[in-house]
Image (tube, rainbow, N blue to C red):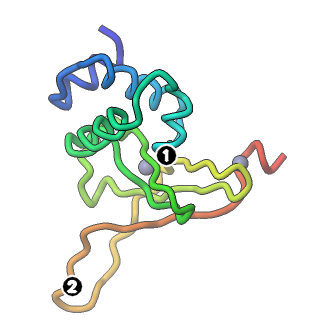
Amino acid sequence: MSKVDDILKLKGVKPTSVRIIVLDYLLDQGKAQSLKDIESGLVRTERSSIFRTLKLFEQHKLIHSIDDGSGMTKYAVCADGCNCELKDLHFHFFCISCQKTYCLTDYPIPQINLPKNFKMLQANMVIKGLCETCNS
Ligand SMILES: [Zn+2]
Ligand SMILES: [Zn+2]
């Protein structure tokens, strides 16, 4: 079994051809992708089925979405053991030159003391700068 099949099975997602293609593509890229990025990478797959697949993957905690301030939601494959819980939230890095977004899974979002009776549900921590390629 390939890694793609393993992940789909683990997350309880039925492996259809579109799902396999989209997940394979996301894993291949190694960085977060917008719907537009995926669309241009998978020219033979319809936008609407890519979008439906992303939403399904998100529901099954297979990918997470990132708002990096670029105006386009990006999607990245969750790391092994990620359940998209608060403890799994991590920093992201957005390269202002090539506009690529990376998961910094080694850096979880720190716990902060919120005002009394406030509850944290999401966090959007984006570091902006230059990636290795753009910085050289
Ligand atoms: Zn860059
Ligand atoms: Zn991430």
Q: Residue at x 40, y 30 (%)?
A: 46
The mark found on residue 63 in the picture is: none
Task: Check the image and report above or below for 75 versus 5.
Answer: below
Q: Residue visible at 47% across and 59% down?
A: 91
Query: Is tag 1's residue or tag 2's residue first in the polypeptide sequence?
Result: 1
Please count the marks in the image: 2
User: Residue 22 is drawn in which quadrant?
Assistant: top left
Front position in the image: 106 or 95: 95
Give the amino acid at mark 1: Ser
Q: Residue furthest right?
A: 136
At label 2, the amino acid type is Phe
Residue 34 x/y as whole percent? 49, 46
SS for callout 1: strand
Horizontal and vertical percent position of residue 59 = 21, 45
The residue pinned by badge 1 equals 34
| Residue position for label 2 | 118
Ligand 2 under 8 Å from disc 1 Cβ: no
Question: Could you tell whether 105 is left or right of 85 in the image?
Answer: right
Residue 109 is left or right of residue 28, and the answer is left
Rendered view: 125 above or below 114: above
Residue 39 horizontal/vertical position (percent)? 49, 34
Place residue 116 in its image quadrant: bottom left
70 to 49, vertically: above or below: below
- For the residue with label 2, is its CB less than 8 Å from the closest atom of ligand 2? no
Viewer-nearest of discs 1 and 2: 1
